[in-house]
Amino acid sequence: MKLKHLLLSALVLLTTTVTFAQEEWEPQTFVTGYVNTAAEYTDIDYKHYWNDIDPAIGLSEVALLTSYKPLSNLEFKGTLVYHNNLSDIRDLFVEAYGRYTFNEGFKVSLGKYLTPLSPVNQYFFAPLNTAASLPMLVSHHYLLPQSISGLQLSGEFGEDIKMGYNFTYGSYLSVGHSAFGMVGIQGREDILGLPISTDSEDFERVSHLGGSGRIYANYKGLLNLGLNYFDGRKSLFAISYGGGAPEWKSSSKNSYGVDVQLNLGSAKINGEYWVGSEETKELKSSTGDYYSAEFKGYYLEAMYSVGKLTPFVRLDYVSDVQGAVVLPVNYELFKLDQQTIWYLENVLNISEFDTQLTADVTSYTVGLTFRPIYEILLKAEYRHIMPSNDFKMLTPGIDLPQGSASSYLEDGSFNHYTLSLVLSF
Amino acid sequence: MSIFTLGAMAQYKVIANKSNAATSITKDEVASYLLKKKKTWASGAAVVPVDQRANSEVRKAFSSAVVGKSVGAVKSYWQQAVFSGKGTPPVEKANDQDVIDFVKANQGAIGYVSSGADISGVKELKVN
């Protein structure tokens, strides 16, 4: 009986605090979008690379966002983003949801959302992202999935000092690396031209259950601090030697992040730091240890607006798929992910590997945006991308299910130039 | 006070529903209400902002003088808010009379009209 009263009281509380802000509500429709055309060039130099990367000019992204509010407390939103390397129709719908606002402190949404646990996901869209390229935390989206479908509870309290929360639970598409941009460098800075990593989209496009949580505090729009958490299931691609077929192994994955945004009017600083791990009880070494791996990434960006010009700098780092192996027999070096290295070392007891060579990537960016009018945005950007090693890759001495490697990167670092024109409406 | 500021101030009036107890308001408060940064009046009532079309002269003058941004910059602000799920812009009305009618019909409404508009039926808030 007490529970019944409690539920009834909660229902009354929720329904009586509904905000009817407009007595004579008129349905509101808002439509916005953009077309992003880019010219890109990279001097990445893979010997024997199966496709040379030519300079490219063309349509990089198109986005359309529609919002419809038939009632003051009910909103429908849909966002479609096409990009040059779109490989699956499911990726076209980055957001599609309905949200009911009981009050500012309690909103319930159903549908699919850009994962709300990371502010950098807000910069997914070209007009909002100062740089022409996405932060690697977003484009790799291994530490945080790009979108989650399901149920979302969110709310915000206060005015000068705002406290907010956002909890989302549902299915997410487990995609490790998704190519972006005209030359397909973005999102694959550490795997391009190398054997396909086990977490790449070509190997796994499977939905798993997962949830995210975010709490944040905002002081007068000047300073924002956030804490984020993601936890989900994942499948690992377990390699098999000796003629056996590769198998999927169920695993768990979680990550933690902290973010800060400082907005001083003309000057803005954004930063995030993430750590994550995955583990499975289905892969056991000869000594009885279970497989686990850890990941890390961060991002720091500073910009300063001078009229219609905004120069900016950005530092990116990710270590999500990593590891390198030396095969002493042929003195060959090729890159593998952590799981494969662990498997070779601990299950197959092949110990002659040098696993100190990791494949983390650091990227330095400088750029300039020019927005003479709202509808036109021009971005020029230079990135210097530095994988932690010189991946010199020859045909491996063993047959990996990922395929044999036949290319190698002469010099570990390379440059990436982008000129981007964004037309907004 | 500069001649430019005087000129800009003379081009618009901030209006509210007659039931609203406020008689004056600061520039920062008006900007916060129109940008939906503040959502309640001092009385606790919900604020219902109403904007004018982006190409109207009164909006250009208002945005520059009160919000401190060009109309294009305000549109960029709302584009970011919409894309990131933080909110949608205020309802836009085609002319002064439509704004006045909206403010009459909504107790928590706040809007702005040209300085020469007939605002009978609503009240003007003095901007400090």
Image (cartoon, coloured by chain):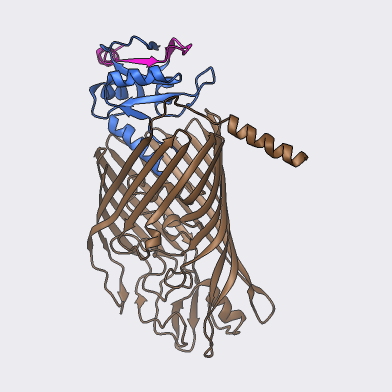
Question: Does A35 appear above or below B116?
Answer: below
Give left or right: position of A149 versus A84.
right
Q: Quadrant of the N terminus of chain A?
A: top right
Give left or right: position of A4 versus A50.
right
Position of residue A142 measured from the top left corner of the image (x, y, whole percent): 49, 61
Give left or right: position of B124 versus A110.
left
Position of residue B51 measured from the top left corner of the image (x, y, whole percent): 34, 26
The answer to whether one can see residue A350 in this image is yes
Q: Quadrant of the C terminus of chain A?
A: top left
Position of residue B82 measured from the top left corner of the image (x, y, whole percent): 39, 40
- Identify the residue shown where x is 61% and y is 82%: A347
- Report which quarter residue A242 is drawn in: bottom right
The hue used for chain B is blue
- Identify the residue shown where x is 44% and y is 26%: A22
Task: Determine if the magenta segment contains residue B23.
Answer: yes
Q: Viewer-proximal residue, A46 or A252?
A: A252
- Report which quarter residue A26 is drawn in: top left
Q: Viewer-proximal residue, A383 or A155?
A: A155
Query: Number of callouts in the render?
Result: 0
Q: Viewer-proximal residue, B38 or A5?
A: A5
Q: Which chain is brown?
A: A
Position of residue A350 measured from the top left corner of the image (x, y, whole percent): 57, 85
Question: Does A375 appear above or below B35?
Answer: below
Magenta extent: B1-25
